[in-house]
Image: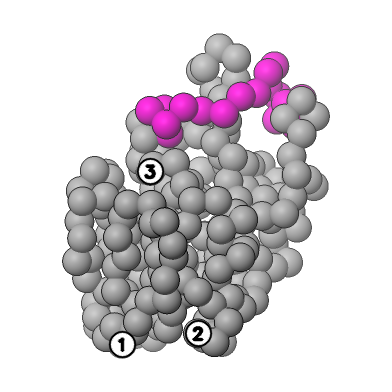
Amino acid sequence: MRPLVPNPQKSAIFGPILGPRADPQRPSGLPAVPAAPKTGAPTNPSQQLRHRTIAMSDTSTAARLPTSPESLIQRLADLGIEVEVHRHAPVFTVEESQALRGDLPGGHIKNLFLRNKKGDRMWLVVVEETRRIDLKALAPMIGADKLSFGSPDRLMTYLGVLPGSVTPLALINDKAHQVQPVLDRALLSMNPLHCHPLTNDMTLSLAPSGLLRFIEACGHKPIYLDL
């Protein structure tokens, strides 16, 4: 996979790869982020991975998470999955990311954390960011009666992330396998895929095959649908 270096001439929030950690509070404006040095690269030469990470200077958000972004990235390295991590100011919606990220080719995803009416079944639906999903139409496709979005408390309990940071990589926190991942087949033809590594001030890029390997390594078997 060739390096994905955002163009700072076109981007307001995606600075050069691995800029410093941004303010975790929602900013009123999203300024450009200057570059910072690389750190934390894997030392095992047999893996030959191009992981790029940086130490977290502000741990207020990460301290509340059951798994830190650094631990997640190390888990990916242990699985031999090649990734790149782009640091930027926090983004809270698809529209913010689209408007401010600059030129990052590949598939940008959005994630829907859903529950059934009774609340005893949950799904994480992963689709391309512009895809519109009709929950009424989706329900019978995944064997649900009625779908609604999971609450922030439920999201933290089962996937260990905050709203705005939902990602298929959060399945690392679903040790009991209570959340069923659902993937749009169209994503498999988009390379690389971009998603948050548990916080919304970073974007992680990886091949579709790497994402599937990670999901399976977490003990989950995705449902594939044409959405």
* Residue 90 found in image quarter: bottom left
When the figure is inspected, residue 192 is found, relative to residue 66, above or below; the finding is below
Residue type at mark 1? Pro
Residue type at mark 3? Val
Tags 2 and 3 touching, CB below 8 Å: no
Q: What residue do we see at 76% from left, 34% from top?
A: 134
When the figure is inspected, residue 181 is found, relative to residue 81, above or below; the finding is above
The magenta segment is 138-155
Residue 142 inside the magenta-drawn segment: yes
Q: In the image, residue 192 lies at what x, y percent?
A: 60, 72
| Residue picked out by circle 1 | 45
Q: What residue do we see at 55% from left, 68% from top?
A: 100
Under circle 2, the secondary element is loop
Tags 2 and 1 touching, CB below 8 Å: no
Under circle 1, the secondary element is loop
When the figure is inspected, residue 123 is found, relative to residue 171, above or below; the finding is above
Disc marking residue 103: none
Residue farthest front in this picture: 28
Quick one: label 1 or label 3, which is nearer the N terminus? Answer: 1
* Residue 66 found in image quarter: top left
Q: In the image, residue 89 lies at what x, y percent?
A: 40, 65
Q: Nearer the viewer, mark 2 or mark 3?
A: 2
| Residue picked out by circle 3 | 161
Residue farthest top in this picture: 118
| Residue picked out by circle 2 | 8
Q: What residue do we see at 74% from left, 39% from top?
A: 133
Under circle 3, the secondary element is loop
Residue 31 inside the magenta-drawn segment: no
Quadrant occupied by the C terminus: top right
Whether residue 198 is visible here, answered yes or no, is no
